[in-house]
Structures are given as structure tokens and as C-alpha cells.
Amino acid sequence: MSFDIIKGMATTLRNMGKKPTTISYPEQERELPARFRGRHVLHRYENGLERCVGCYLCAGACPADAIYIEAEENTEEQRVSPGERYAKVFDVNLLRCIFCGYCQAACPTGAITLEHDYKLASYYPEDMVYHKEQLLEPKGQATVGSNTVWTDPAPPEATQPVPQERHVFDGTQASAAAVGLGDLPTEEPVLLVDEEQDEDRRKFERGKEKKNV
Ligand code: SF4
Ligand code: SF4
């Protein structure tokens, strides 16, 4: 018997009786962390209205260009959301999605969250584009999803040393930096040229300075 076989047998014997680290999926499933990011869910309010107001902020924040929205105006006869508009079409291309959660973070109404559904295989690529009908909570259900676990502050070891400086976008920094979410200078300054807006910004800055005095 060669030495390699003896070594292999020894490893087998050493591990016999130990608890396996693998599980028998799909009969068994692992418990996921509370902040696990799986497939998106669109939420409703208690009164049945959709939380999504078709503002496109999630699509704008998406680094993978995975969200496609067509917004439509609400009317008094047909009110779908409490805002001016609602999402008539809301598609998420899960083949493009990198499950970063930026869409959830960008949403002002808590309409979109990433939940624990990770079983997303399909034979056909087009089936991986999830439509509003698949993403929206059914009528009679109104949850806030993983927004509850994301409202808790992150543990200190997870906080990032990002600058919290001006909180005003004046074009000298990338917009994310201007609101304290990074510190990347823009390649070419895109300073505002609208005098009225500039004046508003200066007033805002002066007000802040006075407060700090
Ligand atoms: S999780 Fe990230 S990549 Fe996926 S749709 Fe949302 S913002 Fe885009
Ligand atoms: S999910 Fe949120 S961010 Fe996206 S369009 Fe709807 S309201 Fe706006």
C-alpha cells in the first residue's frame, strides 16, 4: 500500500464521527444572516397602496443598470400609490444584479428590499428578468421586509471612515462625496452656473456657518 493511500485513509479515519460541515441541500437549508441580500420584493402599505412612487432613484443608484421602470400618473379614479406616480412597469434583471442593495438604500419610501429568496436558477435567461407582478407583495400583505434589520446601526467594526463634510452638492466632488458617502474628486469640476441656485447654496452655507458659531 503506498504512503499516499495510508495518508488518505488516516484522514478519513480522523474525520469519521465528526459533524459534517456540508448539508444535504435541498432537503436541508442553512439559516441565513438577517442582512442576507437575495431577490427583491416590492412592498405595500397597510391600506393596500403600493409603496413605490415611480421616482427612479433605485434605477439611478443601480451600478449594474439592472432596474427598468416605467412610471405612470396616479388619478383619483385609479390610485395605485400615495404619490403622484406609481411604477406601471418595474423589472429587475437578476442576471445583471450584483445584489449590492444600493436600490434598497436609495428608495425614499422603503418600497424595495432584498430578501432571503436565493433560489433563482432558470433554464432561460429571459426568466431571470423579474417583473413587477412577481416582485410585488400580494394584496392583503404589507411588510417592510429587511428594512427593519438595516435600520439598526452597523456594529462599530463595520463602520467606514467616510468624510461627513459639506452635505451640499456644489460640483467640486462626486455627488456621493458631497453628501458624505465617499471622497472622490470629480475629474472636471462641474460647478453650478445658475446664479439663483448658487445664491441659494451660499445662503444655505452661511446659515450653517452661523449655526456652528
Ligand atoms: S441590488 Fe444592486 S445591482 Fe441589484 S438591482 Fe439593486 S442596485 Fe442594482
Ligand atoms: S422602488 Fe423606491 S426608489 Fe425605486 S422607483 Fe419605487 S419608490 Fe423610487
Image (cartoon, helix red, strand yellow):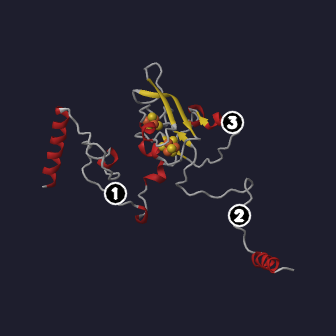
Give me the C-alpha separation between circle 3 and circle 2. Answer: 29 Å
Q: CA distance from mark 3 to mark 1?
A: 41 Å
Return the x and y of residue 65 as percentages of the image width and height: 49, 38
The three-letter amino acid code for the residue at tag 2 is Thr
Q: Looking at the rendered structure, which numbered label has been put on residue 162? A: 1
Quarter of image, res 14: bottom right
Who is closer to the viewer here, 200 or 211? 200
Residue at label 2? 22
The spot of residue 6 in percent (x, y) is 81, 80
Question: Does 129 sit above or below residue 18?
Answer: above
Res 76 label = none
Please indicate, yes or no, whether residue 144 appears anywhere in the rendered image. no
In the image, which is nearer the foreground, mark 1 or mark 2?
A: 1
Question: Dot 2: what SS?
Answer: loop
Q: Amino acid at mark 1?
A: Val
Give the structural element (helix, strand or loop) at label 1.
Answer: loop
Establish whether ligand 1 lies closer than 8 Å to the Cβ of label 3: no
Which quarter of the figure has residue 212? bottom left
The spot of residue 81 in percent (x, y) is: 45, 30
Q: Amino acid at mark 3?
A: Tyr
